[in-house]
Image (cartoon, helix red, strand yellow):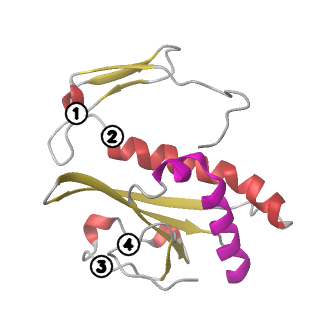
Amino acid sequence: MTEIKSVQYTAKTHTSGGRDGSAHSNDGRLDIRLTVPGTIGTGTNPEQLLAAGWSACLLSGMVLAARNLKVTVPSVRFIYAEVDLCRGDDGYFLRARLNFSLPGVNREIAKALMQETHRICPYSKAMHGNIDVAINLVDDVLKTPLKDQLPNSCHPKVEQQTSGWRQNNVGSNNL
């Protein structure tokens, strides 16, 4: 385990009602309704929150990753994160796809930048060895349809790579 030199931030929330409840932060910045995925409701769900938090962390971490690789961080960059709530023989589990879009960046530099960003991201470190994660380079994330509009194994214009931490069932071409 990594030795803690300092705590940079502690998020504090109060959640009630589980997946059909609400969550609030102690500083008042977070005040949300929660709804069970796939049901009618106006709230979000833990999988959407994980996808948003993880992709935001990755995009911010890309600045440090670019510095580590001595490349310029792309001014235009997107991540379309997909977090699946799955059920298997031993109960529920998660898997994820992190679809990076780095328009105008050389593909080899983009791949290296994605890998370094994923390596240093605290969310990625937390997921390491715990869930299946695929890192994908997509040509234009804004043109990539939502997952539920695609067949399960279909992602147009995607060059896929697994994180190397756990093999993903979606299929991959290691970079």
| Image coords of residue 20 (percent x, y) | 19, 30
Who's the residue at 31% across and 38% down the image?
44
Helix, strand or loop for disc 4: loop
Would you say the residues marked 2 and 1 are in contact, meaning their CB atoms lie under 8 Å apart? yes
**Which residue sits at x=75%, y=54%?**
63
Asked if the residue under mark 3 is in contact with the one under mark 1, i.e. CB atoms within 8 Å, the reply is no
- Amino acid at the residue labelled 2: Pro
Residue 104 makes an appearance in the image: no
Residue farthest to the bottom? Answer: 173
Asked if the magenta segment contains residue 113, the reply would be: yes
- Residue on which disc 1 sits: 19
Upstream in sequence: badge 4 or badge 2 = 2
Whether 39 is drawn above or below 109: the answer is above
Q: Please say if 53 is above or below 77.
A: above
Q: Residue at x 73, y 77 (%)?
A: 109
Q: Indicate the secondary structure of the residue bearing disc 1.
A: helix
Q: Which residue is mark 4?
A: 168
At label 1, counting other C-alpha atoms closer than 10 Å, the crowd grade (few under 14, some 14-19, many 20 or more) is some
In the image, the segment drawn in magenta is: 107-127
Q: CA distance from mark 2 to mark 1?
A: 8 Å
Label 2: state its secondary structure.
helix
Alpha-carbon distance for marks 4 and 2? 21 Å
Residue 163, given in percent of the width and then of the height, sits at 52, 69
- At horizontal 59% and vertical 46% (from top left) the residue drawn is 122
Q: Are marks 2 and 3 in contact (CB under 8 Å)?
A: no
Q: Are marks 4 and 3 in contact (CB under 8 Å)?
A: no
Q: Amino acid at mark 1?
A: Arg
- Depth check: 51 or 124 in front? 124
For label 4, count other residues whose C-alpha is less than 10 Å away and answer few (under 14), some (14-19) or many (20+).
some
Q: Give the farthest residue toward the right.
A: 70
